[in-house]
Image (tube, coloured by chain):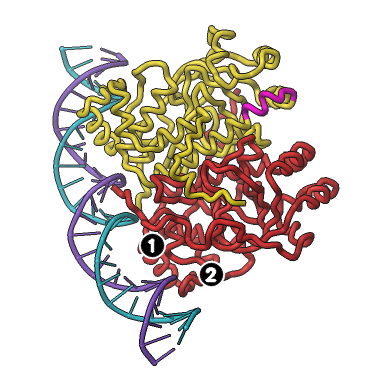
Chain colours: A yellow, B red, C cyan, D purple
Amino acid sequence: MNEKLHNPPPAPRAGRPAACSQGAGARSASIENSLLAALPRKEYSRLLGGLEPVTLSFGEVLYEPEERIRHVYFPGSSLVSLLTLVDGHLALEVGLIGRDGVVGVPLILGHKESSVRALVQGAGTALRMEAAQFLAEFKLSPSLRQELYRYTHTLMAQISQTAACNRFHLVEERLARWLLMTHDRVKSDQFHMTHEFLGHMLGVRRVGVTKAAQVLQERKLIRYSRGDITVLDRGGLETAACQCYEVVRDMHDGVQSVPAARKAEVSEAA
Amino acid sequence: MNEKLHNPPPAPRAGRPAACSQGAGARSASIENSLLAALPRKEYSRLLGGLEPVTLSFGEVLYEPEERIRHVYFPGSSLVSLLTLVDGHLALEVGLIGRDGVVGVPLILGHKESSVRALVQGAGTALRMEAAQFLAEFKLSPSLRQELYRYTHTLMAQISQTAACNRFHLVEERLARWLLMTHDRVKSDQFHMTHEFLGHMLGVRRVGVTKAAQVLQERKLIRYSRGDITVLDRGGLETAACQCYEVVRDMHDGVQSVPAARKAEVSEAA
DNA sequence: GATATTCCGTGCGCTGGCGTACATACAGTG
DNA sequence: CACTGTATGTACGCCAGCGCACGGAATATC
């Protein structure tokens, strides 16, 4: 009966409305996002005209479940978590989106609402576009469609893997994995992140995070104080994390490193 | 340290290769699948020509992770589970596909491989098409594209919800939910399903399933013997299951019943 | 510089589920 | 009918993580 997990509803602080403000690096920020960067020049620059640079602040909620999607976001230095809410007061991160992705996948699949909460987990830059305009651009650009559909698959795979990870692996391993994923998407070795917040991401109590973080700190893998987390030993963290980290990372790279063992077990006779 | 969960790898029995055999009801079987049934007559009948009716047998593996997708399947009376594998010997169901869906979503998103295992969980009919041919048809039919993209979103939402469910809810609730989902997709009140198998679906030990199933049986909600499970009291099962059941079901219907409470908490000032 | 708030550390009893092992019961095969 | 495999029941110790609660420390506020 693990019903009441963490009482305060997962919105950390910072109210709902337009905390996003106009950012500076309009043109330069765009190439921060790898999906946009991969577009051919022509479609890229047309799209750029409709994109509005914004600064997302920590704790901001971009989408709420069953709520209409207003904008599509291409994160630059910002970081967005997808959270499944359950029983009204429990949260679990199912996806993490950074410069390698886009927030607003339901739109490209023909749905106007998101089924999860999209929460800004790392402040930073992003480019956004109003939903209707985006859909128009989406229709016009084959490259954009291909990019986004392929990313959608990556996201699905990530969600699936995360599901199993959350079921089977220890908090300590999952914490390490989560820190690595964040570290990959932020440029700095340091980021702000309280134990309470991490508890919402991992779907565990704050104390559970504290215990796990202590172990990692004792091993000199990280250092933290009042929400400022510093990655000290990346390699060590990778050892401490579960395999899921590498699995998900390699999906992004499209490496598809097929373990030879598995390949052999599958007969090719058709 | 719940590493070694269930030793026998999740493939129940029945070997890999073409256990699928030619089915009879070619034309009649097609409308069993609601995605196909929703297509306009014209595109529907063209597609039908390329679809091959097959009978899927219990335990058959349609896709293996990182393996090339050969066919797309539109289940009729059959039932297919998507399983995430982890650490080589653990499995967890993340999606359940019946007559309301399609197996082969990665293809429509531009990927040639699946990231999960697709396992036939309920024997029955299906229509299938070879991958290359399907992609050609897919390009030609806007309605088909729309249908499938929308279904993809539904599947993503289902996976996300399942992820949280597996993290937070008790085995008993999840078992009830799972039986309901199966019951929805099969016509009969009875289906074959051992505790061992259910353990793989729910990501728990066989014994865990036995304990949970006992409780449900004592409450006269189900009856079972040597793998034959009978649903006795559907309403009771719904009570015993977690909310996730209704959440996922309503997504399929597109009901999107917005809880008024949540709606209010979201300020509409823009 | 006193106070409030946020963040982190610690302790304690509890329990759901794990790993393991063995016992029973039914079903098919010969 | 005996035999063998499959499916389910039972038991026991163990532990990760839970809910709860309080203490201490650092930062912000006035």
- Is A147 included in the stretch rendered in magenta? yes
- Callouts 1 and 2 on one subunit: yes
Q: Which residue carries the number 2 mark? A: B231
Amino acid type, label 1:
Arg
Q: Chain of mark 1?
A: B
Residue shown at 22% from the left, 25% from the top: A220
The residue beneath circle 1 is: B206
User: Residue A9 location, x and y as percent?
Assistant: 41, 36
Task: Please state the extent of the stretch shown in magenta in the rendering.
Answer: A140-148
**Helix, strand or loop for disc 2:** strand
> Residue B183 vs residue D23: left or right?
right
Q: Is residue A115 magenta?
A: no
Residue B76: give its label.
none
Residue B240 percent coordinates (x, y) = 46, 61
Whether residue B152 sits left or right of residue A244 in the image: it is right
Q: Badge 2: few (under 14), some or many (20 or more) residues near its Cα, within 10 Å?
A: many
In this rendering, the answer to whether B67 lies above or below B121 is above
The reply, left or right, for residue A145 in relation to residue B63 is right
